[in-house]
Image (spheres, rainbow, N blue to C red):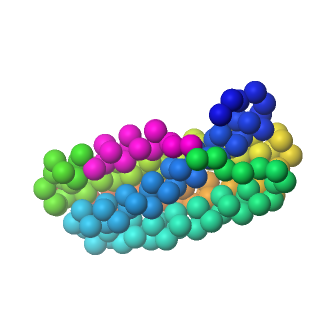
Amino acid sequence: MVIKTPNDLFIRLLSEINSAEKQITRALPKMARAADDPQLAEAFKEHLEETRGQVERIEQAVDTIPDIRVKRIKSYAMESLIEEGQELIEAGEKGPVLDAALIGAAQKVEHFEIAAYGTVISLAGQLGYTEAKNILAETLKEEKATDEKLTKLAKKDINQKAG
């Protein structure tokens, strides 16, 4: 895809986010199964449901803009982050240390998403795609809340058990 205009960039970035969210829906069940702490496993399951809604929200945002379609573009950044998480699962034993590693891996994903959504929301505003911007802003709030939830789980209990 050739990127010549801010609109082209918007489509590219939205397509990458769409790919990233779909990849996450495949990774979260594995992370939930690998988690030893019940609260962490539940957090991954809850975020899976949230992520499915985020994929739908991307479609809703696209539907508000005439003549725009999401492209089949793979998010290699997300693929790499998920692969890194999978390697941790394979290398670790189920327990507090792996739980701490899973939180770290999940937060890397969340930080990537926060950056990606921030960028695409900014572009949507610049392009006058107000409705799409507002729809995507809901997802950004969810991503930030998930990051906070993971931080609280780590600080409250999991990292201490791992230590």
Q: Is residue 91 visible?
A: yes
Q: Is residue 29 or residue 141 the one in the foreground? A: 29
Q: Quadrant of the N terminus?
A: top right
Instruction: Specify the quadrant of the image occupied by residue 2.
Output: top right
Which residue is located at x 72 percent, y 51 percent?
69
In the depicted structure, whether residue 128 falls above or below residue 94: above
Secondary structure character of the magenta stretch overall: helix
Asked if residue 157 can be seen in this view, the reply is no
Q: Nearer the viewer, residue 91 or 146?
A: 91
Coordinates of residue 100 in the picture (x, y in percent)? 26, 53
Q: Quadrant of residue 79?
A: top left
Give x and y (percent) for residue 48. Answer: 45, 66
143 on left or right of 132: left
The residue shown at (24%, 46%) is 87
Q: Residue at x 70, y 43 (%)?
A: 11
Residue 118 relative to residue 35: left or right: right
Question: Would you place residue 38 above or below residue 92 in this image?
Answer: below
Does residue 34 lie above or below 17 as drawn? Answer: below
Q: Residue, x 38% and y 40% (percent of image)?
A: 80
Report the side of 110 relative to 27 (left or right): right
Q: Which residues are magenta?
A: 73-86
Q: Position of residue 72 (x, y in %)?
A: 58, 47
128 inside magenta stretch: no
Q: 14 and 99: which one is in front?
A: 14
Image position of 105 (left or right of 61): left
